[in-house]
Image: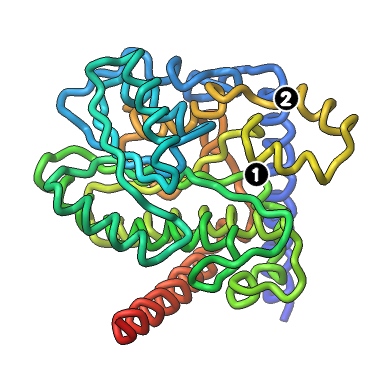
Amino acid sequence: MVKSMARGLTKELEGVEKVRRGRIMRYGDAVKYLMGLPGASGYGSKSTGEEVTEGVSLSCNLTAIITGATSGIGAETARVLAKRGVKLVIPARDIKRAVEVKKIILRESPQAEIIIMEMDLSSFDSIQTFCSNFISLGLPLNILINNAGKYNQRLDLSGDKFEMTFATNYLGHYLLTELLLEKMVQTASTTGIEGRIINLSSVVHSWVGRGGFQFCNMLNPKEYNGTLVYAQSKLANILHAKEIARQLRERKVKVTANAVHPGIVNTGIIRDYKGLITDLTFFLVSRLLKSIPQGASTTCYAALSSQMIGVSGRYLADCNDRICSNLAEDEKEAQKLWEETHALIQKRLVSQSYCA
């Protein structure tokens, strides 16, 4: 009994120490963020996508798919990758906006190769059609950037009858990754070049407690809180990246998966939030916001940096490894979410196939 109590006390003390170290690291991260100090990678909160990819030498042609590349961080990520010689495939619901982004990129990088294809990330049918059309092109796939993000103040449902924010930010990216994963594995095997999957997340994932992360309720919430739903989708993005990374390690294939927090960036999502907070609060918070080029830096770093070779299952912010919430680190929770999502999507796809 004494030994058992001693072991229990030791475990509790270890947990306290872990929390203490985590808090100290978070305080340190906050100071680095505010001052723009570089971390272990040599980059920090003030670094831009161009800066973190400067000097990147691509020995061969890479192909990247970037969702949400018609505005904000996604458009900037596309611009930087095109400038570094990456062939881009931009799936878009709004083709007109995608064409405008393509024109802007080509003005700066006339040699850039950019393919625009139609896709609605909130629709399973649309995602399937996009993936089928992309694979029929016979292109390799080296980089998949699951960047698109949506925030709804009020409850809205996707065409598949799921809550729109969760459907777009998580379910759509899950299915997209699932349908393109073997193409990435095949590309990595054939070329010997590491494939990289990058999920855009957010620090707000830490606002979600274990009791507030119930799969069925996230699909169709009984009481709607737009901020909580957004945070849940960003937590799901981290868990998805970690579980995919685990599966890829088990398969011993040359593809990595990581989640990134771009920082609080002055994009369309922030403008959606503005209606929920006072103008004064928004003004004060806006002083801490990153620019869009700074917001794209961690994604560009994860996509192209040689420092990220072999790095998988991590959560990055300001181009450096960061601590995420205990729930986001829970391997069993990640596996459970993956299994529940897989079962849901398979059931829905089989149902749609039967009805067709």
Residue 242 tag number: none
Image coordinates for residue 66, horizontal then vertical, percent: 38, 40
Q: Mark 2 sits on what residue? A: 31
Image coordinates for residue 353, horizontal then vertical, percent: 29, 80
Nearest to the observer: residue 334 or residue 350: 350
Residue 142 appears left or right of 28: left
Q: Residue at the location (38% across, 58% down)?
A: 244
Nearest to the observer: residue 50 or residue 138: 138
Q: Residue at the location (49% across, 72% down)?
A: 160
Q: Mark 1 sits on what residue? A: 203
Q: Is residue 333 visible?
A: yes
Residue 57 appears left or right of 175: left
Image coordinates for residue 45, horizontal then vertical, percent: 60, 23
Give the class, few, some or many, for how many residues have Cα within 10 Å of label 1's Cα (few <14, many ≥20): some
Image coordinates for residue 32, horizontal then vertical, percent: 67, 23
Query: Considering the numbered disc 2 on the image, is that residue within a helix, a strand or a loop?
Result: helix
Q: Examine the image and state in which quarter residue 102 appears.
A: top left
Above or below 96: residue 113: above
Q: Which residue lies furthest to the front in this view?
A: 96
Q: Residue at the location (15% across, 43% down)?
A: 139
Residue 202 appears left or right of 271: left
At label 2, the amino acid type is Val
Query: Considering the numbered disc 1 on the image, is that residue within a helix, a strand or a loop?
Result: helix
Q: Do the residues labelled 2 and 1 touch (CB within 8 Å)?
A: no
